[in-house]
Image (cartoon, rainbow, N blue to C red):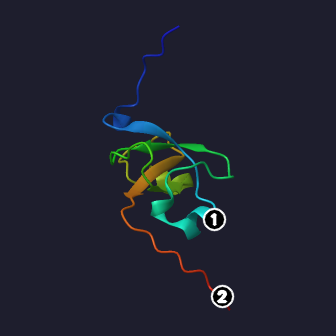
Amino acid sequence: MTLSRGVETLRGGRFLVVSPFSREQYAAGLGAGPGMGVDPSLVIYDNLGGGVGQVVGYEEGREAAQPFDRPTPVDAISSALVNEMFYSPWKG
């Protein structure tokens, strides 16, 4: 069986499997290297060009479909390619 029906608004992008950062990964920063978090992975639509091992920011839910002019079947979308990350937890 071949699935050939596409959604026009999704042309030009691709789908990525991403793993949300854990608290320990945030504390280690971007220099710690890629790794899987403890939370379940999810699939996001990416039209920014995120690559393997790169840190991306993403939005879930209804906000994920907001960039499109027409209703689009997307549950999560990449919203940022992260170059720097600062983690400073409150110690109060």
* Mark toward the start of the polypeptide (1 vs 2): 1
- Does residue 31 appear to the left or right of 81 in the view shown? right
Q: Name the residue tied to disc 2.
A: 91
Q: Which of the 4 image quadrants contains residue 70?
A: top left
Disc 1 on helix, strand or loop?
helix
Mark sitting on residue 24: 1
Which residue does the image show at 62% across and 45% down from the upper left? 41
Labels 1 and 2 touching (C-beta < 8 A): no
> Vertical placement of 61 versus 10: above or below?
below
Residue 22 x/y as whole percent: 63, 60
Q: Which of the 4 image quadrants contains residue 91?
A: bottom right
- Does residue 67 appear to the left or right of 18 in the view shown? left
Residue 77 x/y as whole percent: 46, 49
Q: Mark 1 is on which residue type?
A: Glu
> Vertical placement of 91 versus 28: above or below?
below
Q: Nearer the viewer, residue 13 or 24?
A: 24
**Residue farthest to the front?**
32
